[in-house]
Image (tube, grey):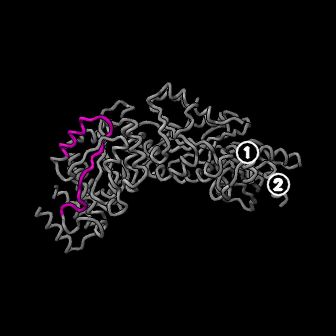
Amino acid sequence: MNSELRLRILHMVCASGEGHIPSAFSIVDIINYLYEHQIDIESLRSGSIDRDYFVLSKGHGAVALYVVLEKYGLLTTFELESYGKSDSILGGHPDTTKIKYVEASTGSLGHGLPIATGIAMGLKIKGINRKVFCLVGDGECQEGTVWEAANIASNQGLENLVVFIDWNGSAQQLMPIENLSEKWKAFGWKVFTCDGHSNLALRQTLLEVSKVSGPAVILANTIKGKGSKLIEGHGIWHHKIPNAQELRQITLELQGA
Amino acid sequence: MPSLRPIFAKTLSNLGALDENLVVIVGDISHGLLGDFRNSFPNRYFNIGICEPAMVGVAAGMSKTGLIPVIHTIAPFLIERAYEQIKLDFGYQKLSGNFISVGSAFDYSKLGCSHHSYADVSLISHLPNSQVFLPGSPLEFEILFQKAFKQDKINYFRLTENSHDIEIERKSIKIGAGIKLREGSALTIISTGAALRNCILAATELEDLGHSVEVLYLPTLKPFDSEIVFESLRKTRKFISVEELSSHDGLYNLVLKGSLGLDGIKSKQLAISDFISGYGTYAEIQTRAGLARHQITRAGIDLIGK
């Protein structure tokens, strides 16, 4: 679990008064792992179409992506500190037209996976051997376009597409999706599960993914708000900004972790 | 009255050979007609199935990789159903692509309102980087598409199955250019796409009755040729707009904007103001919408008498 990144998220959100802290805490370990071990950072810097791709489909987790991009030198500290201000390139949902290293302007759910599918198809047409990663929320799996794209990707045999589901149980408190794993299997995907907060589990699972052909989906067991008992789980904290006392409490929890 | 689909297929085959970035994505339609493209460029042809919103998102992803997507299916499903994908994935993200619809407003006249589309042109026009074309004959499509498809734009071509069958001079067909087909002084009839046919017939009727009628034709609605409209209305001060589009936002509004600065303009709008329920031939649905020859002629007589 990346406490430093979580502290960065927490302080950015509190300073600007905008952000989804629990959602960001849920996905930050996955995103960090991808940028640390899977994505060729130099290929991103080149700006070439011949690069690795990461699409954050659940755009409200944007701050998790911003802090990771900062960590790997793809956003500056100055840019992060401007987050949420009127002249900033960074806001509550990511904007690809403002940030070179954000692949898609997401926010409205159900858009990222079709776009990632199209990128994966485009790379195959062009004969470019790169991976496309896409992170989708489990609540987002209630969007029809997720399953439209799931159909297309398996039909096209996209072995260059790897999807993570942030399986934090958001869907369960809305309209429960039973047997999510079986559903992806039925759509023709290779399905894996792992602990979405463990580098070791992510490494082992991605190794397994690399051995199969066809699109792969990893149901990543995550905890919404992971790292702070105060905000863990579902409910009021989804889009709530901590007050000074709560900020101290969450900070202490993260520092103690 | 020929369909524009064969020239669409032929144009794609020609351009597909010249540009290896051209990719065709269809939503389970026109696969027979596009057989030549599919056979020539099998890795650049996708019948993606019946899932229009994801089809648009996929096309946006392809556009990100430098490909030039051509996305094709029936107008209400392509534009109205998938509008949020077009708005966000292409518009907001500033990606370019070519949307080619069939069915126009009510070409599927015997299939009912589910296959009609009245607001498609308005919707695409709202996107800052868009161009909107309603070619009414094969030559118009061929020329306009060739010029537009590689521009860094969201291009919308609304194909018709009912070409207007009026000869348009090749050299007058340009992006954003209106065309003056008849010169007159008492009234201007203005139309776009397939609606031109009845306008020409009505203009002839009005001329036979002794009225001098000017006919303007605008196969491009965005960018809109306000200048040709202004010049005509400065002379006639009266116009009828005839459009297979929603009366709430279409050709009439564009013409009114084009006439800004001119006093005393009198006008009539012939457009679609409600669901055109029921079934029938194209001509019958056209009449129900108020866009038939005799309805244009009647509107012209009323307006000239004012």
Q: CA distance from mark 1 to mark 2?
A: 22 Å
Identity of the residue drawn at 25% across and 67% down = A14
Residue type for callout 2? Arg
| Residue indicated by mark 2 | B298
| Horizontal side, residue B91 vs residue A190: left or right | right
The chain to which mark 1 is attached is B
- Image x and y of residue B52, in percent: 49, 46
Identity of the residue drawn at 77% across and 47% down = B214
Q: Residue furthest right?
A: B209
Q: Nearer the viewer, residue A216 or B254?
A: A216
Instruction: Looking at the image, tell me whether mark 1 or mark 2 is earlier in sequence order.
Output: 1
One can see residue A91 in this view: no
Magenta highlight range: A202-227
Identify whether A18 is placed above or below B200: below
Instruction: Determine whether the residue tagged by mark 2 lies in a helix, strand or loop.
Output: helix
In reply to whether residue B128 is colored magenta, the answer given is no
| Residue indicated by mark 1 | B281
Q: Nearer the viewer, residue B266 or A253?
A: A253
